[in-house]
Amino acid sequence: MDQFNQTRRAFLSDMGLGFGSVALAGMLQQEVQAAATTQMQRLAPKAKSVIWLFMIGGTSHMESFDPKPALTKYAGKTIDETPHKDVLKSPYLENERVVAFDPNNGFIRTELYPLQVPYRKWGQSGLEISDWWPHLGKQADDLCLVRSMWTEDSNHGAQLQFHTGRHRVDGFFPTIGSWVNYGLGSINENLPQFVVMGQPIADCCGGQEAHRANYLGPQYDGVPLNIDPVNPLPYAKPAKGVFREEQVGEFQLLGRLNRLTAEQYPNDAAIRARIRSYELAFRMQMAVPDVVRFDDETRATQNSYGLNQDETRPFGQQMLAARRLVERGVRFVQVYHGSSGGAGRWDSHKGLKANHSKLCKQVDQPIAALLADLKQRGLLDETLVVWASEFGRTPGSQHADGRDHHPFGFTVWMAGGGIKGGIAHGRTDELGFHAVENRHYVTDVHATVLHQLGLDPRALAIPGRKRLEKEFGKPIHEVMG
Amino acid sequence: MRSLLVLLPSLLTTPAVFAADVDYERDIKPLLMEKCSACHGALKQKAGLRLDAATLIRKGGDSGAAVVPGASSESLLFQRVSTDDIDQRMPPEGEGEALNAAQLASVRAWIERGAPAPDDEPIPTSPREHWAYQVPVRPNVPKIDEADWTGNPIDAFIAEQHRLGRVKPVGLAGERTLVRRLYLDLIGLPPTRQQVDEFLKNKSSDAYAQLVDQLLDSPHYGERWGRHWMDVWRYSDWNGYKNQLRGSQRHIWRWRDWIVESLNDDKGYDQMIVEMLAGDEIAPDNFDVLRATGFLARNYHKSNRNIWLDATVEHTAKAFLGMTINCARCHDHKFDPIAQHEYYAMRAVFEPHNVRTERVPGQPNLMNDGVARVFDAEPEAKTFLYLRGNEKHFDKESPVAPTIPAFFDRPFGVDPISLPPIAVFPSLWPHIEREEIQAAEQRVAAAKKQLDRRQGEATESSAASVESLKLTSAETALKSLRARWAADKAKYSEQSSDDTAHLAKAAADAERLAASHAAKLEVSEKQVASDAAKASDEADASKKEAAVAKASKELQAAQKKLAAADKALGLSDAKYASVGKAYPRTSTGRRLALARWIADSENPLTARVAVNHMWLRHFGEPLVANVFDFGLRSPRPTHVELLDWLAVELIEHEWSMKHLHRLIVTSRVYQLASSADATLTAANSKADPDNQLLWRANIRRLDAEVIRDSVLHVAGSLDLTQSGPDIDYTEGETVRRRSIYFRHAYEKQMTMLVLFDAAGPNECYRRSKSIIPQQALTLANSTLSLSESRKLARALWSEVSDQSDAESRFVQLAFTQMLTRDPSEAESVTCRNFLKQQATTLSKPSALTDFGGKTTATVQASDDPAMRARENLIHVLMNHNDFVTAR
């Protein structure tokens, strides 16, 4: 093993600057740093990494983080029969841009549906959180609920929109994770800077584009990771019988040959990108399996994430891997929950109670464990955890026991990374219909994330390209600690 | 250039704008078109203002003139686009990105110069004036001084742009580079050493043209370009959960074969369109043509007919017309002159159609094989406009009639098509009758054989009497089948026969008789079973009792059935079960009308869109940036005259794609080198960093399929068998067929191909070309590349092993075989050093660390360290940048 490590060290230095012309080496180095670093105004960073949790399908804000007793009070009445009928005349309704992939859904439902779950106050802050999130409740004093979100798409294209800031019909754009990847240098040279876990959102709603970099270039795409030490990535290991030293020799030769070609074609940017992709690939196949091998985690830690229970294990493993990734310096970890090959499992047009109580169980304990674990390790201050869903659900009922899509008001929460804990920012109206106080479009969340990482959301734009057509987003300064 | 990863700021600055040299037509008009015209143009005039012509700009709107010539700061236009006040700025937030500094500079410069514009600038009277909506007219070929650029009209157009854009083209690519480029481009495989040598040896002046002809004649041309068109036409094998079909159709591979064959036959593109959209209407009794309608059958969607038809409308328009009519599903189109009802009028064309599977000779089970095709199942089906796209909200009283958008200003004549009997009643296919009768005959023969065997046995038994009844039943069943077939043939054949009624009666009688005998047989069988149950020596009394009760119950049921069958023998009506399903006798002809309009030489879009797709795949970049939207959001492209010239050329040469390929690849611009000396590169890059003017060739990463096929092909392993059913996508590393033949569907795609940006089965008008570490892992760690490199290393070594400079020759052969070029001296030395060093490393097994991989390569590594080092070298070249690149 010693000999191998020696070879490996020699190899890595060779890969870096030891070989090839000075000009080429310089070019490679410069491109690694990305044009962005020099372009962007850097602010003092509050956080180093982001863990971005995305619930696919639309989680009910009213049954999670935004209690609305009025719904129970007026249950069965139409909105027009309540004192809150003005919500149906609000100019905010104009924000909706309709692209009905499924013409059955995505409409305002007017017959009010009562709350399906009780709430209680948690922690010193007394933050109100529903009983479907009992574990998370215990972390309430670290949570910052943003109860005044709105978006445009009343259908599941909003999933993509939540990641790009742009409406589905406007096309594909770099996602928040890819901007972070682009905007920040590496902390860890052995791992991709932007890692994705969980089955991605389906093609209907943006598909893989929700973690891609589009015009920033594919090296800023999110890299999908499986929780499987043998096969964390496709082709993570060579076939049986290949020796490590053998492969080191091959990669060294490859680096040399590609550099010889690169010198011959100084204007071929692709070859330099390919050289780097091989260097990262080589290091990744060493470092990545270790991230998803949990042998060195205590039983207590594993159990706290729910690895000992079937219903919490899949998401629990991803949360534990997420902690291990940020521990190793990965910048952006995006975790999807609830992919169904279609709209997403959170999409509760009917049977909301059964659906949400089950799904909350799958994620509640693992997320709470992640927050507690990060805190205990002193990582929460430098790790910004964001929990989101593409939109909320209608105050009115659909199919008797469900709720439809609702882009006009919903909740996301953040924790750690220099964000104040134990607060609720913004407000929806009495019915949970419109965000009415401190309204935030999704790019405000992006801007907040970028700001906490020390990136100026406006300076991040590339000349000649549009980061966002709608708006750059404004950091939510009120929630910053 | 988007595919190239390095987005240095200098490359991203808009290049075309030189404030010192501002030109209204070139710089201002397209800018205003992009930024302003959706609200201030012919379609809409917010604030009474139009900005789509200089005179209208000067005239202004409700707030007065938009420009004060010579005074940009007093000009409303400049004030509004340059202000920092977010409430005032145009375009408004959410409607468009603000103008960047260069754009502002050019607007300012233009106004300062007095806002000059051609006096004769036409005022767009309507979006109908859009360049892509005009029937293409063959433009004059520019007169060019440079002799090299006059031979091919394409070159003349390109040279003219070089001159205008002040760039100087690079020289021609080297012969080896070119021959590799051409092979990869036309047949999707790198040339073998022999093929390269053959070309280099051919000293005739038209050696290159000969090679072009040879490759266009190769059956592999159809596979290469078939895959391209499969992207555009959304080829997808069937998808679903387990055996349940959810999308596309089983056996849709026959459409893929049709695509490959049609391209190889150089079938006119117009004819291909007609066959794909209406093959069932022009050749209802021709399976070869019916296959083509896989284009439509592929849209099948189990759970929702609206999604199915929406996809059909959207992608027919995008693929053939570069038209985003789908944007008009919920409201009028925001940019193009397409009203919402016109979306539904297009849908009405497809409303009656549905999908069915034809039975092919030799395979009665449609799960196993068949021809998926479309037909008009409900000629009377009505289409309604869904308010806001909501299928629940429509006016039942106002169905929408099928037609094309009005702005095309063409009549849409629909003639219903009367279908031949065999299309109405597919059981008339001789092979179906033959196979069904044969099957019935075989049942008779089997029964006879069984009875003979019984009768040969000594003792008379109840079993023998059952066998006898079995034979009678089989015989009467055969007779019944024949009679029913005769009756159906009379009923559905073209000539109405006086015998029809008589034959129907005979069929009914035969069927009743067969039913009676079948019932008799069943009674007899159940009697035997009942007797056996009673006689059984089952010790458990209650078990025996239950068995006897069950057998006797079944016997009673059979007896009841027999009584009914016998009673039916007394009937004399002519009702019989038809031998197959009948379909409507006419097809609406709507799809044929649409197809003929799309494929009409007067259609402004069709040829342009096709030419653009072809150009993209020859050059790596299209002439019109958005390949599926030629509407008003696509400004007049730089190379519009070239595009139009090629479009007319395609139409006038009977829509021959091979003609166009030949023209393109024999042009000088196609044969340019991809690199040049630093001075020229620097000078050109300043004017045209993205190479939009094609002053050099684009360096291109190979397509996913080409990469996998190359791995196999350089090792001599590629199985070049053509056509046939889709191969399981999980077998991509063990089955050595070309990649096009593997299953390609939602969640059923080869990982290796997906990682190299294979087409998404749902939509892929243009592929991305990424460079990511997972691709490196794929080529480095797949069993495929390991096995093939081991195989190739041994083959190459056997060629040179007895030579004195064997190692050096080996390296040389490896480079020419895999990269189509000789190694440089530095490369050769590096490789030879590697061979030595690696062999030394590998010769000390005790010092080596196992990687612990789990997959198994089909070819094992050599035991000889020197040979294994050679295998490693080949494996490295398979990972070399230039292995996946066409320069």
Image: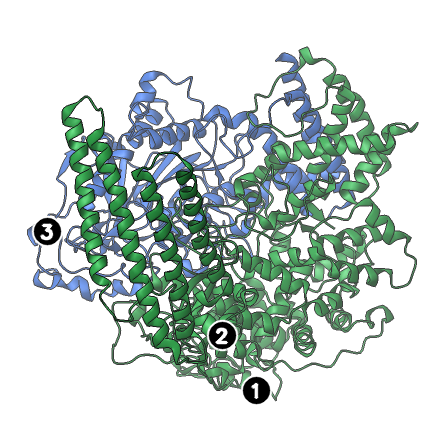
Chain colours: A blue, B green
Residue A377 showing in the rendered view: yes
Q: Position of residue B536 (x, y in %)?
A: 23, 28
Q: Which mark is residue A70?
A: 3
Residue A64 showing in the rendered view: no
Q: With B286 as the anchor, is A406 left or right in this view?
A: left
- Mark 3: give few (<14), some (14-19) or many (20+) Cα within 10 Å: some
- Mark 1: give few (<14), some (14-19) or many (20+) Cα within 10 Å: few
Q: Secondary structure at mark 1?
A: loop
**Which residue: 19% across, 47% down?**
B557
Splitting the image into 4 quarters, where does residue B486 fall? bottom left
In what quadrant of the picture does the N terminus of chain B appear? bottom right
Q: Which of the two residues, B818 or B371, is positioned nearer the viewer here?
A: B371
- Residue type marked 3: Ala
Count how many numbered circles sit on residues in the image: 3
- Residue type marked 2: Glu
Q: CA distance from mark 2 to mark 3?
A: 61 Å
Q: Relative to B90, is B201 above or below?
A: above
Disc 2 marks which residue?
B281
Q: Relative to B437, is B810 above or below?
A: above
Is there one chain holding both mark 2 and mark 1? yes
- Residue type marked 1: Pro
Q: Which mark is residue B122?
A: 1
- Pick out the residue farthest to the bottom: B120
